[in-house]
Image: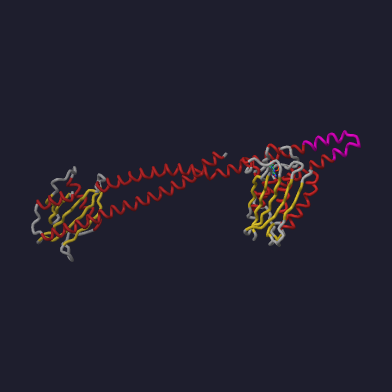
Amino acid sequence: MFKKVHFRLTLMCGGITTLILVIMTLGYLYISEKNLKDTQLLSFRNNMNTVTANLEQQSVITHEWLSKLEDNGKYMIFLMDNDIPFLFNSRSTHADVEELYTAAFAYYRNSFSIEMTAPSLYHSIHTEFIFSSASKEEYYASVITLEKGKNILQMLVLSPLTPVKEQLFNQRLLFLGIISFVLIILWILSYAFTKILLRPIEENRKNQIQFVASASHELRTPLAVILSCLESFKQAPENKKETFLNIIESESRRMSTLVDDMLDLSRSDNHSFSIEKESVELDTLLLNSYEAFEPMAKEKNLTLSIYLPEAALPLCICDRNRIRQVTAILLHNAVSYTPAGGTVSLSLHLKKKHFFITVIDTGIGIPDDEKEKIFHRFYRSEKSRSAKGHFGLGLCIASEIVKAHNGTIEVIDTPGGGSTFKVRLPVL
Ligand code: ADP
């Protein structure tokens, strides 16, 4: 499924960027080609200005001057005297040069509707245009009209567009090369980036699947016990029935706790984890937690102690019930994973605008390679798998609660053996 999404995302990102890039390149090419053509026409026009000025100054137009002009500008020149053709370009390679000149003149007359009269306001006039021949060859063309004595002299100058077209073709080839290279890089990057983008979603999905699998597995055990107890209950004599009822009750409570934990985590995933902040006296809260776990510690033959600062503490702005839940999780674990005769202590102190709640035990300890994993969902270390009423969700919930209070939770080894959990909460 993710492969399909990845493929589609790559296609979408790559497609959109390719489209934008192609439009931009075509736009740029269009503008630059237009500019090139305009510049060439302008330069041709400037040259024609000079030619016209030269023509005006000369009383006699020599063959030599015309040949030089043709060679220098790579022009094709044709002269008309009083509308009578009188000199063709001698070096033209065009198959039917006369037809070409006639067509160019006809085009000039049709397009600019100019009569064969002497330029009235000016001594001479010249007009530049782009002319396309019958064989689809394009030329910059200029018709210079000037008065020579009593005659009207017209000179047609043609300059083939082929060199400009070659330049444009080369430019297009260059752009095609560059754009192809850029597009290959772009598609590779699109593929890589969408993969990176999808990785957290893929991981999240894997976690969800793992979560459901673990939850089902955890629920299956108490359910199986309940079902088998019900079967036995039906056949048991009256005096034995209560035993089965007690087991059913305790397993149902276990299931209820697990479902509550799972609900908490799913709320945290949905960001609908409710945190109702209020001013809380943390020392009182810790004292209550201590008192709640005293009987359990006594039952396990553990020494449970509490250390609170003597000086008055500022109020902590937090969710009373959630922080109580955190201390309960830590104390429950400490008492559960500390063998008889051990000690568990709960303490609170204030340092640099932070409250520190610490739970220290002298229990079985947590290996270094598991210190991070124990905060993952349903993670239980091998040593503690047999502990009843533990599903591997407590520390994960505690960490979500602490995070929601902008605090941190960490675990270190207790010197001499055991584990020390430290919760840091900001003083707001
Ligand atoms: P559980 O409900 O199984 O205790 P937790 O998320 O609270 O789930 O803890 C995860 C695992 O971390 C436990 O199964 C246990 O292996 C380990 N652990 C937690 N607290 C302690 C502790 N005080 N001492 C030793 N191991 C602990």
Identify the main secondary structure in magenta: helix
Q: How many marks?
A: 0
- Report the residue that reaches farthest toward the front: 416
- Report the residue that reaches farthest toward the right: 238
Q: Is residue 358 magenta?
A: no
For the residue pair 184 and 117, the one nearer the viewer reads as 184
Q: Say if 266 sits above or below 243 in the image.
A: below
Would residue 130 appear left or right of 312 to someone viewing this image? Answer: left
Colour approach in the figure: secondary structure
How far across and down, in percent of the image, does residue 47 sit? 19, 56
How far across and down, in percent of the image, does residue 156 sit? 18, 53
Residue at the image position 68 percent from the left and 39 percent from the top = 381
For the residue pair 41 and 150, the one nearer the viewer reads as 41
How far across and down, in percent of the image, does residue 283 sit? 73, 57
Picture quarter with ligand 1: top right
Would residue 275 appear left or right of 43 to someone viewing this image? Answer: right
For the residue pair 340 and 170, the one nearer the viewer reads as 340
Would residue 205 appear left or right of 155 to someone viewing this image? Answer: right
> For the C terminus, which image quadrant?
bottom right
Give, as a single range, the part of the protein colored magenta: 224-245
For the residue pair 12 and 388, the one nearer the viewer reads as 388
Residue at the image position 66 percent from the left and 54 percent from the top = 356
How far across and down, in percent of the image, does residue 348 sit? 69, 55
> For the N terminus, which image quadrant?
top right
Q: Is residue 243 magenta?
A: yes
**Residue 372: quarter of image:** top right
**Residue 42: quarter of image:** bottom left
